[in-house]
Amino acid sequence: MKSRPKDNVELEERAATGVIRASRFVRNYARTQKKIDIATIKLIHKEIWKEAWAEIAGEYRTENLKISGSKLLLPHYSKVAKLMDGADRELEKRIDVIDDNCRGKIIGFSTINDELIECIDKVVSLAAWIHHTITYIHPFREGNGRTARLAANLILERYGLIGISVKIEKENKNTYRNALAQIDRMKDYEPLKNLIYEGLADRYNGVVVKYYPLPSDRK
């Protein structure tokens, strides 16, 4: 194990390297038949932090936290394990629905049809749900946003889409935060789903699956 970082700069440098390592883990894991569950999310977090801050890597937080610039009151640390257990059960149910209806139908798609559009939207909806769930519960001491974005990519890649980069720099940061807040206030996932679709459009060189009418949009 490496020695502790000497300062915050080195800590963030190691965490950035950890994100690259965790991204590889996500890509490799997505190609397997292994179960995706909350234990997998903890492994993603561990990959990010094991050489930057080993004590927190893959471990639930043991203190209360606040999100800078947000009015959201995070769950008390004593409730994190129970909330994550509940998320684990819900994740299993949601994955079962997609496995029953969409497994193998997105990989290598070349023709857009109603069935494909519906399956892509189910996968994007699940990616948005796990992304928000992690940021809302905030189960870890650090790196919840990074873990949430990689967990969403794990869902996308497991079902044949490409992992994305959700832009949260500069002016995009408010858009991202507002999308999460919209879920907190109104259970409205559309803004966050739109960000995921935009990321997919970037990766697919402008082939924007979101611009095909989704089932809920049709008259």
Image (tube, rainbow, N blue to C red):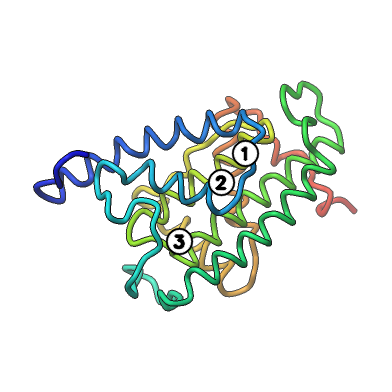
> Marks 3 and 1: which is nearer the front?
1
Name the N-terminal-most of marks 3 and 2. Answer: 2
**Cα–Cα gap, marks 3 and 2:** 16 Å
Residue 172 in the image, given as x and y percentages of width and height: 42, 51
Q: Which mark is residue 177?
A: 3
Residue 53 in the image, given as x and y percentages of width and height: 25, 50
**Quadrant containing the C terminus in the rendered view:** bottom right
**Cα–Cα gap, marks 1 and 2:** 6 Å
Label 3 secondary element: helix
Residue type marked 1: Leu
The residue singled out by tag 1 in the image is 156
| Other-residue count near label 3 (Cα within 10 Å), few / some / many at <14 / 14–19 / ≥20 | some
Q: Quadrant of residue 153?
A: top right
| Other-residue count near label 1 (Cα within 10 Å), few / some / many at <14 / 14–19 / ≥20 | many
The residue singled out by tag 2 in the image is 152
Residue 10 in the image, given as x and y percentages of width and height: 15, 43
**Which sits in the foreground, 68 or 139?**
139
Question: Would residue 109 be found to the left or right of residue 138 on screen?
Answer: right
